[in-house]
Amino acid sequence: MKKEASGGKSYPRDILEHYRFRAIELYNKRKKINDIADFFGVHRCAVSHWITAYKRHGRKALKSKKAKGAKYKISKEELKEVISILNDDATIYDFETPLWTCKRVQQIIFKKFNKKIHTTNIMRLFKKLKFSPQKPERFAFQKDRKEVRKWLKQEWPKINEHRRKWRAMLYFQDESGVSLTPVLGRTWAPKGKTPKIMVTGSRGGLCVTSAISPAGKMVFRIEKKKVNADKHIEFLKKIIKQHPKRKIIVIEDSSPVHKSKKVDKFVEQNKTKFAIYRLPSYSPELNPDEHVWKYLKAYQLRSHQARNTKELKKLVKRKMS
């Protein structure tokens, strides 16, 4: 950035700052203002202004200040309304998808306030407001929020009371698929030269079952076949085997496999030392075991180099252990 110092002349801000400090040094050595101005090629009024500022406020008054930049075209009240709109689904404002882009915000500002703002300036405004482009979490259409609130208010206290009376081990259980196609992370590379990472072109993957306790204890198994009622019961027995002298409470989702008659019969046969509670449908956020899968796929297996399911199985087993 440059700033004008005298008729028609302009200097970079750091150069002007240096001139101001040198001018004060020369002034303190009893040099005349006109001579100082001629030496630096600036107007004598500029030198007089520097000296006055120095006498009143010291050296800090001579330091360069960052330019404030142009004012935004929208007012504070209008900006508040824009931020409020961003909390809504974009489809409410007749856009095809629910996501907000700078282009869409530009259109909303023009429609609401009849003001044209370039998308680059909208991006700068977002950065100033500490907004960032983020990948949203999935949220199922079928999710019943009332059912979730009811579960938290009624069922969760009931589970806690049951655990306390039994002095039981509590586990959250879930299954997940792990793909041969890895989640790719980020890497440094020159601009405009997208790096390439070798990964397998084969399709396939594994199914992994795990259960985690609030204290962080985990039981897991890599499934050889698709999980059905019998396989699920086998895993529940695996949890029980880990704690032969403890009673067990398991919280799991409401998938058809978990709610099968075979599973219900197994629970009934072991009801003196084993109990199952089920989460509301489409509510993964209530299950801490979901974090196990997110961490495994997004971090532990990020950009993995397994070429087949055999290699993937070894890798998953090592990362989960």
Image: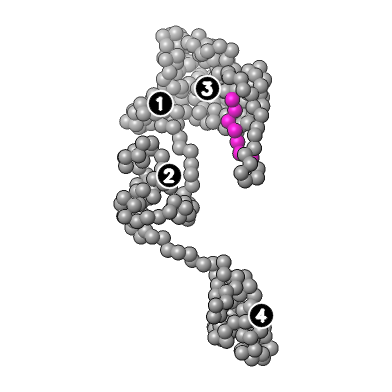
Residue positioned 35% across, 26% down in the render: 142
SS state under label 2: loop
Disc 4 to disc 2, C-alpha distance = 49 Å
SS state under label 4: helix
Disc 2 to disc 3, C-alpha distance = 32 Å
Residue 264 visible in the snapshot: no
- Residue 220's tag is none
Q: Nearer the viewer, residue 118 or 97?
A: 118
Task: Please provide percent x and percent y for residue 297.
Answer: 57, 29
Disc 1 to disc 2, C-alpha distance = 28 Å
> Is there CB contact under 8 Å for labels 4 and 2?
no
> Is there CB contact under 8 Å for labels 2 and 3?
no
Instruction: Name which residue type carries label 3.
Output: Ser
Q: Farthest residue toward the right? A: 29
- Residue 176's tag is 3
Task: Please provide percent x and percent y for residue 125.
Answer: 45, 55
Disc 4 to disc 1, C-alpha distance = 70 Å
Q: Quadrant of the N terminus?
A: bottom right
The residue that label 1 is drawn on is 282
SS state under label 3: strand
The residue that label 4 is drawn on is 22
SS state under label 1: loop
Of labels 4 and 2, earlier in sequence is 4
The region drawn magenta spans 181-187
The residue that label 2 is drawn on is 101
Disc 1 to disc 3, C-alpha distance = 14 Å
Up the image or down, 313 lies above or below 37; here it is: above
